[in-house]
């Protein structure tokens, strides 16, 4: 297979720092060459302190050092590094960005919630098997925010919203006990539903519902009964609305160590999975159609933006 170009996409989220190195064939298809994830917890405490913790930045920079070696090995011509919810909230984000520039020789981009939603939508569609006619809703439920995008199969976006609620933000703000108490769960649900009540997206006018990112993929792995994470089995799997709700309730009743013992859940995600599942369940209940899980996401959208829009910079 001959590739016309190779690029690298990096996403610094609230929980994870991820890398996709991809090429493009002569007919325009995206070909994944390397995909990596490190659970660095960059957003640790940001919802409370409003700042990146020094140890969180150090973890992220260590991951970036690893990623630089991979980018060089694959001879990626252009690189795009985006930062999302946690960086939007952190007063000292320039310090983190300076560390990115020192290591990669490029400028990190602080993208808006709307841009994050658009990139997630395009990335999700790249790997989706759309189940029926009508509009498509993509949900990207991260650590600090949840993006909801309604559009069509061609990639046209009708409505998009970024909600200031995610798995880590909800855990650190409301679900403080381990496991959370009934009162904490009720308060968390109230917060999520207040945001959904005002979200300018037609959640009940959807033919296909796609979920991306670590909360949804980890839920799918647990729902499938996997003993270890299997990306191929998770991708394109489906959960009914009832299965999503039942799984969320089950996770909320467990301690973080019990969640980690399930097998397919990364230890660093175990503490925030139940809070993320609560968000997913509330959205799914309003949508009312099966949730299709996609392993293609914002990283694929970033890679497409490099190819199609000329974004990205050369490694320094």
Image (cartoon, helix red, strand yellow):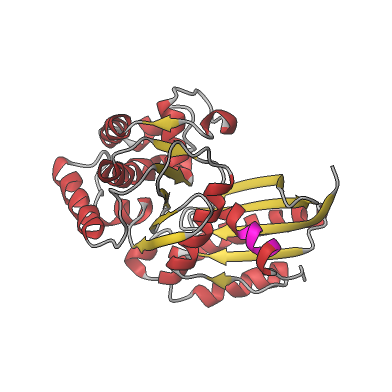
Q: Percent x, y for residue 296?
A: 57, 45
307 on left or right of 184: right
Quadrant including the C terminus: bottom right
147 on left or right of 193: right
Secondary structure that dominates the magenta span: helix
Q: Percent x, y for residue 113?
A: 43, 66
Q: Quadrant of residue 81?
A: bottom right
Residue at screen point 54% across, 31% down: 229
Q: Quadrant of residue 114?
A: bottom left
The residue lying furthest to the left in this view is 183
Residues in magenta? Answer: 302-307
Residue at screen point 32% across, 65% down: 48
Q: Percent x, y for residue 148?
A: 38, 55
- The answer to whether residue 246 is seen in the rendering is yes
The residue lying furthest to the front in this view is 133
- The answer to whether residue 39 is seen in the rendering is no
Asked whether 306 falls inside the magenta stretch, the response is yes
Residue at screen point 36% across, 30% down: 258
Q: Nearer the viewer, residue 168 or 137?
A: 137
Asked whether 170 falls inside the magenta stretch, the response is no
- Residue 128 against residue 40 in the figure, above or below: above
Quadrant including the N terminus: top right
The residue lying furthest to the right in this view is 2
9 on left or right of 213: right
Q: How many marks?
A: 0
Q: Percent x, y for residue 32?
A: 70, 45
- Residue 28 against residue 278 in the figure, above or below: below
Residue at screen point 29% across, 32% down: 254
């Amino acid at each position: 297979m001959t590739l016309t170009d190779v690029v690298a996409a990096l996403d610094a989220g609230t929980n994870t720092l991820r890398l996709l190195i991809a090429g493009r064939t002569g007919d325009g298809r995206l070909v994944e060459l390397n995909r990596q994830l490190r659970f660095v917890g960059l957003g640790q405490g940001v919802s409370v302190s409003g700042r990146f913790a020094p140890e969180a930045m150090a973890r992220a920079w260590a991951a970036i050092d690893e990623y630089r070696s991979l980018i060089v090995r694959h001879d990626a011509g252009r690189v795009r590094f985006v930062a999302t919810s946690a960086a939007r909230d952190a007063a000292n984000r320039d310090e983190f960005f300076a560390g990115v520039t020192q290591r990669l020789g490029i400028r990190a981009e602080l993208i808006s919630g709307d841009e994050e939603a658009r990139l997630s939508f395009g990335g999700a569609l790249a790997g989706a098997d759309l189940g029926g006619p009508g509009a498509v809703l993509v949900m990207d439920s991260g650590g600090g925010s949840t993006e909801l995008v309604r559009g069509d199969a061609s990639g046209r976006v009708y409505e998009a919203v970024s909600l200031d609620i995610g798995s880590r933000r909800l855990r650190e703000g409301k679900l403080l006990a381990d496991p959370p108490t009934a009162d904490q769960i009720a308060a968390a649900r109230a917060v999520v539903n207040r945001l959904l009540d005002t979200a300018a997206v037609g959640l009940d006018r959807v033919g296909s519902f796609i979920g991306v990112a670590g909360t949804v993929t980890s839920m799918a792995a647990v729902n499938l009964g996997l003993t270890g994470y299997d990306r191929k089995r998770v991708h394109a799997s489906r959960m009914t609305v009832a299965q999503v709700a039942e799984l969320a309730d089950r996770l909320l009743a467990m301690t973080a160590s019990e969640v980690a013992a399930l097998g397919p859940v990364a230890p660093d995600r175990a503490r925030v999975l139940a809070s993320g599942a609560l968000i997913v369940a509330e959205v799914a209940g309003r949508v009312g159609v099966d949730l299709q899980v996609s392993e293609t996401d914002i990283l694929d959208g970033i890679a497409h933006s490099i190819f199609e829009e000329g974004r990205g910079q050369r490694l320094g």
